[in-house]
Amino acid sequence: MALRRACVIGLVVALCACGGSAPRRVESADVSRQETLEETRLAERQRDAWTPPVLLWEIGDEAEASYVHAALPFGTTMRHALPEPHDGALDLSRAIVTTFDPREAVPLDQVPESALMGRRDRLDRMLGAEEWTALRAQLGPALPDESLRRIPPMILVEHLVRVRMAEVEAEADGRNPVPHAISTSSVIGDVLAWARMQGAPIVAIDTHEQAAARLAAIPREASLEGLRDALANVEAWRARWSTLRSAYASADDHALASACEASLGEGALADARRAERAARIDAWSALITAQLEEGRAFVALPACDVVGEDGALARIAASGVRVRRLGAAPGSAPPRDLGRSREAGVLP
Protein backbone atom coordinates (compact mmCIF):
# COMPACT_ATOMS: atom_id res chain seq x y z
CA MET A 1 0.00 0.00 0.00
CA ALA A 2 2.81 2.39 0.92
CA LEU A 3 4.55 1.59 -2.37
CA ARG A 4 1.40 2.31 -4.38
CA ARG A 5 0.88 5.66 -2.56
CA ALA A 6 4.45 6.62 -3.33
CA CYS A 7 3.98 5.87 -7.05
CA VAL A 8 0.90 8.05 -7.21
CA ILE A 9 2.64 10.91 -5.46
CA GLY A 10 5.61 10.54 -7.78
CA LEU A 11 3.37 10.70 -10.82
CA VAL A 12 1.66 13.88 -9.58
CA VAL A 13 5.02 15.50 -8.93
CA ALA A 14 6.22 14.56 -12.41
CA LEU A 15 3.17 16.09 -14.04
CA CYS A 16 3.48 19.30 -12.03
CA ALA A 17 7.12 19.59 -13.05
CA CYS A 18 6.03 20.24 -16.65
CA GLY A 19 5.63 23.96 -15.88
CA GLY A 20 2.47 25.96 -16.56
CA SER A 21 1.89 24.66 -20.10
CA ALA A 22 -1.65 23.65 -21.10
CA PRO A 23 -2.27 19.95 -21.25
CA ARG A 24 -2.06 18.49 -24.73
CA ARG A 25 -5.43 17.44 -26.19
CA VAL A 26 -5.45 13.90 -27.42
CA GLU A 27 -8.47 12.76 -29.48
CA SER A 28 -9.39 9.18 -29.76
CA ALA A 29 -9.96 7.44 -33.05
CA ASP A 30 -13.65 7.23 -32.23
CA VAL A 31 -13.95 11.03 -31.88
CA SER A 32 -12.09 11.58 -35.19
CA ARG A 33 -14.40 9.20 -36.97
CA GLN A 34 -17.43 10.95 -35.49
CA GLU A 35 -16.23 14.37 -36.68
CA THR A 36 -15.41 13.05 -40.15
CA LEU A 37 -18.86 11.51 -40.44
CA GLU A 38 -20.51 14.81 -39.45
CA GLU A 39 -18.48 16.73 -42.04
CA THR A 40 -19.39 14.14 -44.68
CA ARG A 41 -23.08 14.50 -43.90
CA LEU A 42 -22.80 18.28 -44.09
CA ALA A 43 -21.03 18.08 -47.45
CA GLU A 44 -23.77 15.77 -48.74
CA ARG A 45 -26.45 18.24 -47.65
CA GLN A 46 -24.56 21.05 -49.37
CA ARG A 47 -24.25 19.08 -52.57
CA ASP A 48 -27.96 18.26 -52.48
CA ALA A 49 -28.77 21.97 -52.08
CA TRP A 50 -26.38 23.06 -54.86
CA THR A 51 -27.84 23.68 -58.30
CA PRO A 52 -25.79 23.67 -61.50
CA PRO A 53 -25.26 26.95 -63.36
CA VAL A 54 -27.68 27.49 -66.23
CA LEU A 55 -28.65 30.31 -68.58
CA LEU A 56 -32.04 30.82 -66.95
CA TRP A 57 -33.57 33.97 -65.49
CA GLU A 58 -36.67 34.53 -63.37
CA ILE A 59 -38.75 37.48 -64.58
CA GLY A 60 -41.34 39.46 -62.59
CA ASP A 61 -42.93 38.80 -59.21
CA GLU A 62 -42.23 35.44 -57.63
CA ALA A 63 -45.92 34.52 -57.33
CA GLU A 64 -46.47 34.75 -61.10
CA ALA A 65 -42.86 34.54 -62.25
CA SER A 66 -41.95 33.91 -65.86
CA TYR A 67 -38.66 32.49 -67.10
CA VAL A 68 -36.29 33.41 -69.93
CA HIS A 69 -33.93 30.68 -71.09
CA ALA A 70 -31.00 31.30 -73.43
CA ALA A 71 -31.08 28.20 -75.63
CA LEU A 72 -28.41 27.30 -78.13
CA PRO A 73 -30.57 26.65 -81.23
CA PHE A 74 -28.39 23.69 -82.18
CA GLY A 75 -25.35 21.95 -80.75
CA THR A 76 -26.65 20.79 -77.36
CA THR A 77 -29.75 19.33 -75.70
CA MET A 78 -32.14 20.20 -72.90
CA ARG A 79 -30.59 17.50 -70.70
CA HIS A 80 -27.36 19.51 -70.59
CA ALA A 81 -28.76 23.04 -70.92
CA LEU A 82 -31.67 22.77 -68.47
CA PRO A 83 -30.84 20.03 -65.94
CA GLU A 84 -32.69 19.33 -62.70
CA PRO A 85 -33.99 21.18 -60.78
CA HIS A 86 -34.18 23.97 -63.35
CA ASP A 87 -36.35 21.96 -65.75
CA GLY A 88 -39.07 22.39 -63.13
CA ALA A 89 -39.55 25.91 -64.52
CA LEU A 90 -41.33 24.26 -67.46
CA ASP A 91 -43.84 22.61 -65.13
CA LEU A 92 -44.56 25.93 -63.40
CA SER A 93 -45.24 27.76 -66.65
CA ARG A 94 -48.57 28.58 -68.23
CA ALA A 95 -47.27 28.59 -71.80
CA ILE A 96 -44.09 27.91 -73.76
CA VAL A 97 -42.98 30.88 -75.86
CA THR A 98 -40.32 30.15 -78.46
CA THR A 99 -39.36 30.02 -82.12
CA PHE A 100 -39.71 27.13 -84.56
CA ASP A 101 -37.99 23.79 -84.00
CA PRO A 102 -34.52 24.02 -85.64
CA ARG A 103 -34.59 20.27 -86.18
CA GLU A 104 -37.48 20.76 -88.57
CA ALA A 105 -35.61 23.30 -90.68
CA VAL A 106 -36.64 23.51 -94.31
CA PRO A 107 -34.19 21.53 -96.50
CA LEU A 108 -32.17 23.57 -98.95
CA ASP A 109 -34.11 22.10 -101.85
CA GLN A 110 -37.37 23.29 -100.25
CA VAL A 111 -36.57 26.93 -99.49
CA PRO A 112 -39.80 28.95 -99.91
CA GLU A 113 -40.19 30.41 -103.40
CA SER A 114 -40.60 33.86 -101.85
CA ALA A 115 -37.06 33.64 -100.40
CA LEU A 116 -35.32 32.36 -103.55
CA MET A 117 -33.35 34.64 -105.84
CA GLY A 118 -34.73 35.50 -109.26
CA ARG A 119 -34.10 33.03 -112.05
CA ARG A 120 -31.61 35.41 -113.65
CA ASP A 121 -29.61 35.67 -110.40
CA ARG A 122 -27.45 32.60 -110.63
CA LEU A 123 -25.23 31.85 -107.64
CA ASP A 124 -22.67 29.94 -109.72
CA ARG A 125 -22.01 33.06 -111.79
CA MET A 126 -21.75 35.24 -108.68
CA LEU A 127 -19.17 32.96 -107.08
CA GLY A 128 -17.10 31.83 -110.03
CA ALA A 129 -16.02 28.31 -110.94
CA GLU A 130 -13.55 27.70 -108.09
CA GLU A 131 -15.82 28.84 -105.27
CA TRP A 132 -18.82 27.11 -106.81
CA THR A 133 -16.86 23.84 -106.83
CA ALA A 134 -15.90 24.39 -103.18
CA LEU A 135 -19.55 25.00 -102.27
CA ARG A 136 -20.65 21.87 -104.10
CA ALA A 137 -18.02 19.86 -102.21
CA GLN A 138 -19.17 21.12 -98.82
CA LEU A 139 -22.88 20.59 -99.48
CA GLY A 140 -22.59 17.14 -101.02
CA PRO A 141 -24.32 15.74 -104.11
CA ALA A 142 -27.90 15.60 -102.80
CA LEU A 143 -28.87 19.14 -103.83
CA PRO A 144 -29.26 19.61 -107.61
CA ASP A 145 -27.51 22.52 -109.28
CA GLU A 146 -30.73 24.08 -110.56
CA SER A 147 -32.00 24.44 -106.97
CA LEU A 148 -28.70 25.57 -105.47
CA ARG A 149 -28.23 28.37 -108.01
CA ARG A 150 -31.25 30.30 -106.65
CA ILE A 151 -30.63 29.98 -102.91
CA PRO A 152 -29.63 33.30 -101.27
CA PRO A 153 -26.02 33.23 -100.05
CA MET A 154 -26.92 33.98 -96.43
CA ILE A 155 -29.20 30.95 -96.17
CA LEU A 156 -26.26 28.86 -97.33
CA VAL A 157 -24.01 30.53 -94.74
CA GLU A 158 -26.44 29.52 -91.98
CA HIS A 159 -26.56 25.99 -93.36
CA LEU A 160 -22.76 25.73 -93.35
CA VAL A 161 -22.73 27.01 -89.77
CA ARG A 162 -24.86 24.02 -88.75
CA VAL A 163 -22.49 21.71 -90.62
CA ARG A 164 -19.56 23.19 -88.67
CA MET A 165 -21.47 22.80 -85.41
CA ALA A 166 -22.17 19.14 -86.22
CA GLU A 167 -18.43 18.67 -86.70
CA VAL A 168 -17.75 20.34 -83.34
CA GLU A 169 -20.30 18.06 -81.66
CA ALA A 170 -18.73 14.98 -83.20
CA GLU A 171 -15.28 16.01 -82.01
CA ALA A 172 -16.59 16.60 -78.48
CA ASP A 173 -18.25 13.16 -78.52
CA GLY A 174 -15.12 11.47 -79.84
CA ARG A 175 -16.69 10.29 -83.10
CA ASN A 176 -16.25 10.99 -86.79
CA PRO A 177 -18.67 13.57 -88.22
CA VAL A 178 -21.13 12.54 -90.91
CA PRO A 179 -20.08 14.30 -94.14
CA HIS A 180 -22.30 17.26 -95.10
CA ALA A 181 -24.67 16.60 -92.15
CA ILE A 182 -26.12 19.47 -90.11
CA SER A 183 -26.48 19.51 -86.32
CA THR A 184 -29.82 18.11 -85.14
CA SER A 185 -29.45 18.48 -81.36
CA SER A 186 -31.50 21.43 -80.15
CA VAL A 187 -32.60 22.79 -76.78
CA ILE A 188 -35.51 24.63 -78.40
CA GLY A 189 -36.53 21.45 -80.20
CA ASP A 190 -36.43 19.53 -76.91
CA VAL A 191 -38.53 22.18 -75.15
CA LEU A 192 -41.11 22.02 -77.92
CA ALA A 193 -41.15 18.23 -77.77
CA TRP A 194 -41.74 18.41 -74.01
CA ALA A 195 -44.58 20.91 -74.46
CA ARG A 196 -46.31 18.75 -77.05
CA MET A 197 -45.96 15.67 -74.86
CA GLN A 198 -47.41 17.52 -71.84
CA GLY A 199 -50.10 19.28 -73.83
CA ALA A 200 -48.73 22.67 -72.79
CA PRO A 201 -49.76 25.69 -74.91
CA ILE A 202 -47.09 26.86 -77.36
CA VAL A 203 -46.85 30.50 -78.43
CA ALA A 204 -44.79 30.73 -81.62
CA ILE A 205 -42.93 34.00 -82.17
CA ASP A 206 -41.34 33.04 -85.49
CA THR A 207 -41.63 30.70 -88.47
CA HIS A 208 -39.20 29.10 -90.90
CA GLU A 209 -40.58 31.31 -93.67
CA GLN A 210 -40.00 34.51 -91.69
CA ALA A 211 -36.46 33.45 -90.78
CA ALA A 212 -35.68 32.62 -94.41
CA ALA A 213 -37.08 35.97 -95.55
CA ARG A 214 -34.87 37.87 -93.10
CA LEU A 215 -31.76 36.02 -94.25
CA ALA A 216 -32.66 36.55 -97.91
CA ALA A 217 -33.03 40.27 -97.24
CA ILE A 218 -29.42 40.69 -96.10
CA PRO A 219 -27.57 42.76 -98.75
CA ARG A 220 -26.17 40.59 -101.54
CA GLU A 221 -22.56 41.80 -101.33
CA ALA A 222 -22.34 41.22 -97.57
CA SER A 223 -23.85 37.76 -97.79
CA LEU A 224 -21.55 36.78 -100.68
CA GLU A 225 -18.60 37.98 -98.61
CA GLY A 226 -19.76 35.75 -95.77
CA LEU A 227 -20.24 32.72 -98.02
CA ARG A 228 -16.80 33.12 -99.57
CA ASP A 229 -15.26 33.40 -96.12
CA ALA A 230 -17.12 30.30 -94.91
CA LEU A 231 -15.85 28.31 -97.90
CA ALA A 232 -12.25 29.52 -97.69
CA ASN A 233 -11.74 29.42 -93.91
CA VAL A 234 -13.42 26.24 -92.75
CA GLU A 235 -11.13 25.71 -89.75
CA ALA A 236 -11.60 29.28 -88.52
CA TRP A 237 -15.38 28.95 -88.70
CA ARG A 238 -15.25 25.60 -86.92
CA ALA A 239 -13.08 27.13 -84.15
CA ARG A 240 -15.46 30.06 -83.86
CA TRP A 241 -18.42 27.78 -83.25
CA SER A 242 -16.43 25.55 -80.92
CA THR A 243 -15.72 28.63 -78.79
CA LEU A 244 -19.39 29.56 -78.83
CA ARG A 245 -20.46 26.08 -77.76
CA SER A 246 -17.88 26.04 -74.94
CA ALA A 247 -19.01 29.46 -73.71
CA TYR A 248 -22.59 28.24 -73.71
CA ALA A 249 -21.68 25.08 -71.79
CA SER A 250 -19.95 27.21 -69.13
CA ALA A 251 -23.22 29.11 -68.51
CA ASP A 252 -21.18 32.33 -68.38
CA ASP A 253 -23.38 34.90 -70.07
CA HIS A 254 -20.54 37.42 -70.42
CA ALA A 255 -18.27 34.90 -72.16
CA LEU A 256 -21.23 33.82 -74.28
CA ALA A 257 -21.97 37.41 -75.33
CA SER A 258 -18.34 37.81 -76.47
CA ALA A 259 -18.48 34.53 -78.40
CA CYS A 260 -21.76 35.56 -80.01
CA GLU A 261 -20.25 38.84 -81.14
CA ALA A 262 -17.24 37.02 -82.61
CA SER A 263 -19.52 34.58 -84.42
CA LEU A 264 -20.98 37.45 -86.46
CA GLY A 265 -17.77 37.66 -88.45
CA GLU A 266 -16.15 40.88 -89.56
CA GLY A 267 -16.73 43.84 -91.85
CA ALA A 268 -19.93 44.22 -93.84
CA LEU A 269 -21.05 40.71 -92.96
CA ALA A 270 -20.89 41.42 -89.21
CA ASP A 271 -22.81 44.68 -89.64
CA ALA A 272 -25.50 42.97 -91.71
CA ARG A 273 -25.91 40.09 -89.28
CA ARG A 274 -26.00 42.48 -86.33
CA ALA A 275 -28.76 44.46 -88.02
CA GLU A 276 -30.69 41.25 -88.79
CA ARG A 277 -30.39 40.21 -85.15
CA ALA A 278 -31.72 43.56 -83.94
CA ALA A 279 -34.62 43.36 -86.39
CA ARG A 280 -35.40 39.84 -85.19
CA ILE A 281 -35.53 40.89 -81.53
CA ASP A 282 -37.64 43.93 -82.42
CA ALA A 283 -40.11 41.71 -84.25
CA TRP A 284 -40.47 39.46 -81.20
CA SER A 285 -40.58 42.15 -78.51
CA ALA A 286 -44.29 42.94 -78.43
CA LEU A 287 -45.39 39.31 -78.21
CA ILE A 288 -42.75 38.42 -75.61
CA THR A 289 -43.66 41.47 -73.50
CA ALA A 290 -47.35 40.55 -73.60
CA GLN A 291 -46.61 36.99 -72.47
CA LEU A 292 -44.35 38.18 -69.64
CA GLU A 293 -47.00 40.63 -68.45
CA GLU A 294 -49.53 37.83 -68.34
CA GLY A 295 -47.14 35.87 -66.13
CA ARG A 296 -45.93 32.29 -65.84
CA ALA A 297 -44.47 32.10 -69.33
CA PHE A 298 -41.40 30.08 -70.25
CA VAL A 299 -39.57 31.99 -73.00
CA ALA A 300 -36.85 30.03 -74.81
CA LEU A 301 -34.90 32.17 -77.27
CA PRO A 302 -31.70 31.61 -79.24
CA ALA A 303 -28.89 32.28 -76.77
CA CYS A 304 -27.22 35.03 -78.81
CA ASP A 305 -30.52 36.91 -78.93
CA VAL A 306 -30.77 36.86 -75.12
CA VAL A 307 -27.35 37.91 -73.81
CA GLY A 308 -25.34 41.06 -74.40
CA GLU A 309 -25.97 44.75 -73.91
CA ASP A 310 -28.55 44.87 -76.71
CA GLY A 311 -30.04 41.41 -76.14
CA ALA A 312 -33.59 40.57 -75.19
CA LEU A 313 -32.76 40.19 -71.49
CA ALA A 314 -31.20 43.66 -71.29
CA ARG A 315 -34.32 45.11 -72.92
CA ILE A 316 -36.55 43.35 -70.41
CA ALA A 317 -34.45 44.61 -67.48
CA ALA A 318 -34.45 48.16 -68.90
CA SER A 319 -38.26 48.19 -68.74
CA GLY A 320 -38.07 47.99 -64.95
CA VAL A 321 -39.19 44.38 -64.61
CA ARG A 322 -37.49 42.32 -61.90
CA VAL A 323 -34.85 40.03 -63.44
CA ARG A 324 -33.06 37.42 -61.31
CA ARG A 325 -30.45 34.93 -62.48
CA LEU A 326 -31.11 31.36 -61.34
CA GLY A 327 -28.59 28.64 -60.55
CA ALA A 328 -25.10 28.69 -59.09
CA ALA A 329 -22.42 31.09 -60.21
CA PRO A 330 -20.93 30.28 -63.64
CA GLY A 331 -17.97 27.93 -63.34
CA SER A 332 -18.87 26.81 -59.81
CA ALA A 333 -18.73 23.15 -58.85
CA PRO A 334 -20.62 21.23 -56.17
CA PRO A 335 -19.10 22.00 -52.76
CA ARG A 336 -16.64 19.40 -51.51
CA ASP A 337 -15.83 20.66 -48.02
CA LEU A 338 -17.15 23.06 -45.43
CA GLY A 339 -14.52 25.78 -45.86
CA ARG A 340 -14.88 26.17 -49.61
CA SER A 341 -18.67 26.01 -49.29
CA ARG A 342 -18.75 28.91 -46.81
CA GLU A 343 -16.40 30.95 -48.99
CA ALA A 344 -18.63 30.34 -52.01
CA GLY A 345 -21.71 31.44 -50.09
CA VAL A 346 -23.43 28.10 -50.48
CA LEU A 347 -24.39 27.92 -46.82
CA PRO A 348 -27.20 30.25 -45.67
Image (cartoon, rainbow, N blue to C red):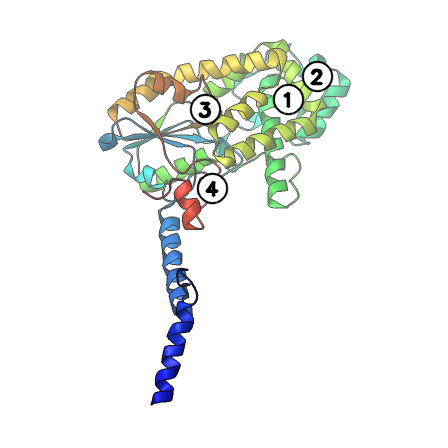
Q: Amino acid at mark 1?
A: Leu
Position of 33 relative to 207 (above/below): below
Q: Tell me the number on the disc at residue 148.
A: 1
For discs 1 and 3, the disc positioned in front in the rendered view? 3
Q: Please tell me which of labels 2 and 4 falls first in the chain.
A: 4
Q: Amino acid at mark 4?
A: His
Residue 195: % across, % down: 35, 37
Q: Quadrant of the N terminus?
A: bottom left
Q: In the rendered structure, are the residues bearing label 4 and label 1 in contact, judged by CB atoms less than 8 Å apart?
A: no
For discs 4 and 1, the disc positioned in front in the rendered view? 4
Q: For mark 2, give the secondary structure.
A: helix
Residue 295: % across, % down: 26, 27
Position of 64 relative to 267 (above/below): below
In front: 266, or 320?
Answer: 320
Q: Amino acid at mark 2?
A: Asp
Q: In the rendered structure, are the residues bearing label 2 and label 4 in contact, judged by CB atoms less than 8 Å apart?
A: no
Residue 4: % across, % down: 36, 86
Residue 152, image quadrant? top right
Give the distance between the C-alpha atoms of the residues marked 3 and 4, in whole angstroms: 19 Å
Residue 61, image quadrant? top left
The residue at which mark 3 appears reads as 307
Q: In the rendered structure, are the residues bearing label 1 and label 2 in contact, judged by CB atoms less than 8 Å apart?
A: yes
